[in-house]
Image (spheres, grey):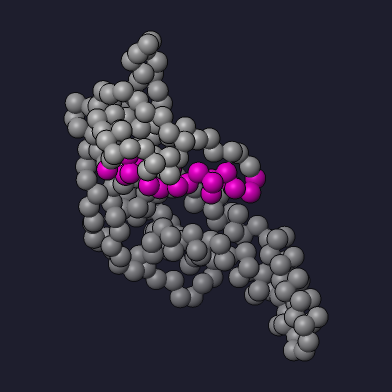
Amino acid sequence: MPPISPNPVHRSRRAARRLTATAILLVVVSLATFTAAVAAPQAPAGGEAARIAAATALRDRALGDTTAYAFVRDLTTEIGARPAGSAADRAAVAWAAERLGTMGFDRVWTEEVTVPHWVRGAERGAILDPFPVEVRLAALGGSVGTPEEGVTAEVVMVEDVDALAALPEGAVAGRIVFFNDRMERGRTGAGYGATVGIRGVGAREAWRR
């Protein structure tokens, strides 16, 4: 397996004053509610029933507005993937600042920030024995890179990070750890939450052991 991440994680200084990609997403999340609030009447003073009615009207107006959807659709279509610190990330910041300006926001500015910057290398893997099978790989951001010559070793299968931690010391030394857990597909995204621990710390814990 060739290097997954030949370059170590390092920190790079953004050259321009700008919004971060995270800030853009936070703005996007609030756009529908903002546009609805602009058009909605002021919440009436009074009791709980009046406040609930005003909140319901605001929610319904936001659900019927497509501003936030159009923002995300155009951002992902025109800019695409925006890894932190990448050229596409910088392009997305400029795109968002211009878009928000054309939407009528009178106070749009960008800020200088420092972010982790990780570069994905070439990924290729294969099962060698008992018969050769190519394996599709996707390196996780911030994962530890393999040596230039790659890694060839026996595979040890575990279900999750806890199962890895329960193994005796040295059980996976010099081996490749395979987490055999499936992310269930669903509209709520619950499957992601159930397995994200492997994605978040699995590679680091396997490398450490």
Q: Quadrant of the N terminus?
A: top left
Tell me if 112 is positioned left or right of 158 in this view: left
From this view, report whether residue 139 is shown above or below residue 81: above
Looking at the image, residue 209 lies above or below residue 178: below
Q: How many marks?
A: 0
Q: Relative to 52, say whether 24 is above or below.
A: above
Image spot of residue 203 (x, y percent): 34, 41
* Residue at x 41%, y 26% (from the top left corner): 136
Q: Given the current orientation, which residue lies at the most extreme top position?
A: 131
The answer to whether residue 111 of the structure is visible from this angle is yes
Q: Nearer the viewer, residue 19 or 55?
A: 55
Tell me the residue at 63%/42% (across/down): 186
Q: Quadrant of residue 134?
A: top left
Q: Within the magenta stretch, is there residue 191?
A: yes
Residue range of the region highlighted in magenta in the rendering: 187-208
Residue beneath the point at 71% across and 83% down: 42
